[in-house]
Amino acid sequence: MKRQSHKQPAGRRPKTGRTDGDTRAAILAAARRVFAQHGLDGASVREVAETAKVNNAMIYYHFKDKEDLYRAVLTNSFSTMTDIWSDPVFTSESTVRQKVEKYVESFIRFQKGNEDLRRIMAMEFAGSGGNITWICESYFADNYARLVRIFKQGMKNGELKKFDPSLAVASLIGVIIHNFILQPMAEHIHGKGVNLSPKKFGAFVTDLFFNGLSARS
């Protein structure tokens, strides 16, 4: 018996009460939750459809296959990180410290709103997933390059001492990400909430980066 395809004929849209945009957004939100729980390999299109309250045909109307859906979820999630660079401070005559401070606050805000993405990325890195290269080239490379240019500008104008900017980028981003990852553990150990707000945590990270923690006489 010939197996029936789940895909709709080109140009035919399954019936639904939502607009295309609303349906696609619902599918992406559902897929993001499912991928955060099971990763790309463990997730199924059926579970995404059930979570989004649509049928399988609607998934295939909007996305070619599961990997296409996965990459669409990542693109949608990383878009707000890319938007960080649209702030006018980065093309202004602001100091390097002001630019770093704005980036840090914005990246913290991005992390606060993307717990599911952190889980997805943790599974990608742990399993050396096949999408790592695509993710790096599509999103991380430009982000790193922009930060490196800011650091080099600071070294050139005397705001920063000489250092390896590639190490500085990884350290700056790592401090932020790992604080979010370790937040539940830190709160359990200290018996109270840890303030990772863009302003308070951002000020700490920026000050740590520029001034360190040593006491000056």
Image: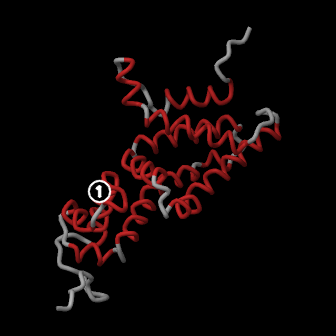
Nearest to the observer: residue 121 or residue 8: 121
The picture places residue 66, in percent across and down from the top left corner, at 35, 70
Q: Is the residue 184 above or below the residue 113 in the image?
A: above
Q: Is the residue 39 above or below the residue 14 in the image?
A: above
187 to the left or right of 169: left
Q: How is the image coloured?
A: secondary structure
- Quarter holding residue 182: top left
The picture places residue 90, in percent across and down from the top left corner, at 65, 47
Residue at (24%, 75%) from the top-left corner?
58
Task: State the residue position of label 1.
Answer: 34
Considering the numbered disc 1 on the image, is that residue within a helix, a strand or a loop? Answer: helix
Residue at (66%, 23%) from the top-left corner?
212
Quarter of the C terminus within the rendering: top right
93 to the left or right of 158: left
Residue at (52%, 54%) from the top-left corner?
83
Residue at (41%, 30%) from the top-left corner?
183
The picture places residue 184, in percent across and down from the top left corner, at 36, 30
The picture places residue 8, in percent across and down from the top left corner, at 26, 84
- Residue type, numbered disc 1: Val
Task: Give the residue furthest to the bottom.
Answer: 1
Quarter of the N terminus within the rendering: bottom left
How many numbered badges does the structure rendering display? 1
| Dot 1 alpha-carbon crowd within 10 angstroms: few under 14, some 14 to 19, many 20 or more | many
129 to the left or right of 170: left
- Quarter holding residue 47: bottom left
Q: Is the residue 161 above or below the residue 3 in the image?
A: above
Nearest to the observer: residue 192 or residue 146: 192
